[in-house]
Image (cartoon, rainbow, N blue to C red):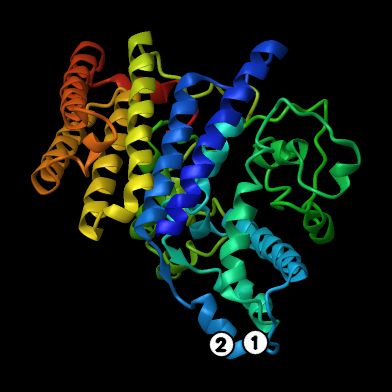
Amino acid sequence: METYAQVLSYAIPGFVVLIIIEYIASLIMGRSVGNAMDTISSLSSGMTNTLKEILGLAIVIVSYGWMVEHFSLLTIQSEVWLYIVCFVLVDFASYWSHRFNHEINVMWNRHIIHHSSEEFNLSCALRQSISGIVGVYFFLYIPLALIGIPGSIIAVVAPLHLFAQFWYHTRLINRMGLLEHVIVTPSHHRVHHAINPEYIDKNYAAIFIIWDKMFGTFKQEDVDIPPVYGVKKPVLTWNPFLINFQHITSLAKDAWRTKSLSDKVKLWFMPTGWRPKDVAEEYPIEVIEDVYAYAKYKPDVPNGLKIWSGIQLVVVNALMYFMLVQIADIDASGIILYAAFLGSSIFAYTSLMDMDKIAIPAEIVKLVLAYLIFQGYSDWFTLSAILPFGQYIIVGYLGISLCMTFYFTQKFVSSDTKSEAKELSPTS
């Protein structure tokens, strides 16, 4: 936990700097790369994933260490070439896990958050899942275990492999010559994130595009077919917690509603989007048919709320960063409590971004958790040692946040706000 937190404490500032550089470059080039609310939602999603990883919220069915112990045919010492072999094999496993996530109904819930943005920029790369709690793809690592690659090497290669997928989430880089034949480029990944009929479910590779060419899932970007981003059934929310569990909630409803006992089981493992016939007829779900006619989710919110949402993002991110650098000095119960506070904070302000009144009870939960932190850790985990009067600044922030939430919900949020937003979309 501490090692991972230390890695993130270096990686997060790097991601933020690159996102800022992309934005500045977009202004210079005169090319839009997104909108403020979508970017805030993406970065907020990244924070929820960080909290999940820090808390270790994952159930491992079969550990890699166990597989090495029982399946390895060789005993290999750590060598430079072994890291290279490991990287290639991890990338191969990533191709298949990624493909399964797209093509199996229940597995799509693990990945929908990453595709939920209707923009395509570096910030959307940080939309990572919190719903993939159970590690189901252990079997893809059997080849690594067979040749005896130590778990210590996996621990180094895996985060490097993940971080190496960040840079190509951009519209500002065009074709890259010979590299297009070897690695995944922005052009390849724009195809992957598109919902155009010509592009959907293509280019699953993470680093080496050769896997898609080998297994028939490669598609070149066509300059005459501009990619349209998002998912076929738009999520219609900026709240990353809601996005993470929308699809599985829909599957559970279908399983409950269908009269066919076989369909109650089958629907989970069918191709993504499959629904029992009786449920599909009685409870139709509209999806985007004409991708060029679809109006993106963009509720009409006051500029003041956009500014306040940005402030919330900065404050909560700063509080999370403090957690990362201080994690060695915080006990387990404190980490859980702090993570719950940060999670409720993200839920509250992203709900407010949706103009949803649930932001008020979420804000109250956040206050209760803050009170518990002050009761158990009076100086907010020794914040004052770094920032004089830090605990009073936290109290001031909490008070302002509560007031702003009440202000925006009472002044601008009506009971019809969400339904009006949904009427703008072809989906329900």
Residue 72 appears left or right of 420: right
Secondary structure category for the residue under label 1: loop
Q: Distance between the residues labelled 1 and 2?
A: 6 Å
Residue 246 visible in the shown view? no
**Residue 261: x %, y % from top left:** 40, 69
Residue 153 visible in the shown view? yes
Q: Who's the residue at 62% across and 56% down the image?
A: 98
Q: In which quarter of the image is the C terminus?
A: top left
Residue 329 appears left or right of 427: left
Q: In which quarter of the image is residue 346?
A: top left
Q: Who's the residue at 22% across and 35% down the image?
A: 384
**Residue 73: x %, y % from top left:** 69, 89
Q: Most extreme residue toward the right, as rendered?
A: 178
In depth, the one of 264 and 1 nearer the eye is: 1
Q: Who's the residue at 46% across and 56% down the image?
A: 4
Q: In which quarter of the image is the N terminus?
A: bottom left
Q: Name the residue under label 2.
A: 69
**Residue 362: x %, y % from top left:** 21, 35
Under mark 1, the amino acid is Ser
Under mark 2, the amino acid is Glu
The mark found on residue 72 in the picture is 1
The mark found on residue 108 in the picture is none
The image shows residue 231, relative to residue 313, as above or below, that is: below
The image shows residue 87, relative to residue 140, as above or below, that is: above
Residue count near mark 2 (Cα–Cα under 10 Å), binned few <14, some 14–19, many ≥20: few
Q: State if disc 2 and disc 1 touch (CB < 8 Å).
A: yes
Residue 174 appears left or right of 249: right
Q: Most extreme residue toward the left, as rendered?
A: 375
Secondary structure category for the residue under label 2: helix
